[in-house]
Amino acid sequence: MTGWQTLFYKEVLRFWKVGFQTVGAPVLTSVMYMLIFGHVLQDQVKVYGQVSYTAFLVPGLVMMSILQNAFANSSSSLIQSKIMGSLVFVLLTPLSHWHWFLAYVGASVARGLLVGAGVFAVTVFFGQPGFVAPLWILVFAILGAAMLGVLGVIAGLWSEKFDQMSAFQNFVIMPMTFLSGVFYSIHSLPPFWQKISHLNPFFYMIDGFRYGFFGVSDVSPWLSLGVVGGAMLMVSAIAVNMLRTGYKIRH
Amino acid sequence: MALQSLFRKPPSKIVDLMPAISFKSVSKIYRSASNKIAPEVKALDAVSFDIQQGEFFGLLGPNGAGKTSLISILAGLSRASSGTVTVHGSDVVTDYANARRKLGVVPQELVFDPFFTVREALRIQSGYFGIKNNDAWIDELLSSLSLLDKANANMRQLSGGMKRRVLVAQALVHKPQVIVLDEPTAGVDVELRQTLWQFIGKLNKQGSTVLLTTHYLEEAEALCSRIAMLKQGRVVALAQTSELLKAASSNVLRFKIDGELPEHLAVKARITGRIVQFPAHNAHEIEQYLSAIREAGLVAEDVEIRKADLEDVFLEVMAEKVGVTA
C-alpha cells in the first residue's frame, strides 16, 4: 500500500471499524421508511402507471442512503480529525492535494455503495423494481456517491465547528435529498415546484438511477448524466482548489 | 554581555555539506479581521539561520516568540508570508514531497486517531510515506520506546506518556534524516524524559539531525551543541552552547534572604521566592553585592557562587534590547 492508497485504506477502515453506526444504522433507517411510507401509501399511490409504490420507493431509498452516507464519510472524517488534531499526521506526509481528493472521495464512494447495497438487500423484500438498464444504476450510484463525497470534503474543510457541519448537513444536504423525488414523482407536484425540482442536481441523480430500474424516468438519463457530470466537475474543481491552497488546514 | 559573541558560525569542518535545515529571511504575519486590537501580528521577522547535518540544535524562546510558527512553516503545516525554508536542499513549498520525506516531526500536543491501535497507526503512517512492509522497523521502534506490550492497544487506552512515545514512533517510521521535536518533554515524568533523550541521542549519534524546542533550559544545555534564541519573532542569539555560556557573566551569586531587597538591588536580581541571584563577573562585584545586602540590614543565608547556566544566559539575552547586526 503506498501513498494515497494508504489514506484511502485508512478512511475505509475508519468507517468499517464503527460499522454499526456507519452501515448498520442507515440500513435500519431505510427499513423504517419503507415500513411506514410503504405501508401507508402502498395502495394509494401508483407511479409510472402500474409500478407499485413500494417498488418505486426502493431505488429512491437506496440512492438517498448512498448520497447521505457518502457525504457523511468525508465530512465527518475531516472535521473530526481537524478539531481533534489528528489531521496533522496526514498534513505532515508528502501526499499531494490530488492524493487527498482521490482518497477521501474514494472512501466516500466505498461507503456509499456499501450502504446502498445493504439498503437494497433489505428493502427489496418489500417491493421488487425491475432491472431494465443496470449500467445506468451503477453509473448514477458511483457518480452520486462521488459528488456527495466531494461535497463532504468541501463541508469538512470549511466547517470550523461541529455545529457548522451539522448546519450544512441538516439545512443543505438533507433537504436537497428529501426534495429530489425520493418519496414521490415530481409530476405529482404543482408546476412551479416541478420547475424548482429541476434545479436540484440531486433530482437528476435519483431520476437517472431510477431509470436503470424501471426504464422510465421524468427526464432522459443522458440529460441527467450531463447535469450530474457537470455538477461533479464544478464541485470537484472547488474541492481540489481548497485542498491545494490548504484552505483552513494550512495557515 | 558582548552580543557579537552570540552570533558565531558553526565549526568549519561541517560547513561544506548542504545544511540539514536552512531558514532564509522567513517572516510570518497573522492577520485577524475580528481582532481589532491587534489585527496584524508579526510572528516571525526575517529569521535566517542554518542547521548543519548531524547537529543537535536547540531553538529557545519565551512563549509567543515564534518557535512553533517557525516549526509549522518548516513542517508545511503553515506557510511563510515571505522567505524560504529548505530541508537538505528541498524547498518546503515548491518541493514539499521531498522535504517532508526527510523530516520527522513530533508535535507538541498529544494528538491521536481514536479509531486505531498503536500498530495500525504506525503501519498507516508508514504507508503514507510509501513504505510497505515496515513491520521490522516498527517493532524496533516499539521496543526502543517500551511500547511492545501496547502494540495492539487502542490509542484511546494509553496514558499520556505512552501517547507521547507513540508520537515519537510515528515521526520516525519513515527514517527521516531530520527529526524535529516541539516541546517533547512538557509535562513528562523524569523516567520517560530519560528514555526519550537516550533514544533521540542514539539517533543523533547515528547521523540524524535533531531540532528541539523546549522550555527546559537545563535540558537544552545538556543536549544541544548549538542554540538559537528567538524573541518576538527575531533571532537574538545564535551560537555554540559553550560559547553562549562563556559569553554570559561567568558566575552567579546565589543566596536566600528573609525580607525584601531594596529597589536598586532588586532590579538587577533574579528573585524566585526566597532565592536571590545576581550575575557576577568577578570577586569585586560579589563583594559589593554582599556588602550592599549587609548595609540594607538583611542577612544572606546559603550563600554560594556557581557557574552561569543556560537559564542565566537566556534571561540576560531576553532582557537586552534587540538590534544587533551579525
Image (tube, grey):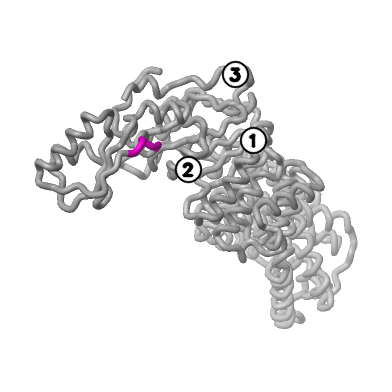
Of B114 and A79, nearer the camera is B114
Residue B208, quarter of the rendered image:
top right
User: Which kind of residue does numbered mark 3 sit on?
Assistant: Lys
Residue count near mark 3 (Cα–Cα under 10 Å), binned few <14, some 14–19, many ≥20: few
Residue at point 72%, 44% (across, down): B128
Question: Do discs 2 and 1 belong to a common subunit?
Answer: yes
Q: Secondary structure at mark 1?
A: helix
Question: Do discs 3 and 2 belong to a common subunit?
Answer: yes
Which residue is the site of mark 3? B13
Q: Secondary structure at mark 3?
A: helix
- Which span of residues is magenta-colored? B306-310
Sequence-wise first label, 2 or 1: 1
Of B144 and A38, nearer the camera is B144
Which residue is the site of mark 1? B205
Residue B237, quarter of the rendered image:
top left
Which residue is the site of mark 2? B219
Q: CA distance from mark 3 to mark 2?
A: 26 Å
Sequence-wise first label, 3 or 2: 3
Relative side of B189 to B120, left or right: left
User: Which kind of residue does numbered mark 1 sit on?
Assistant: Lys
Residue A191 appears anywhere in the view: no
Residue at point 46%, 30% (across, down): B241
Residue B199 x/y as whole percent: 62, 45
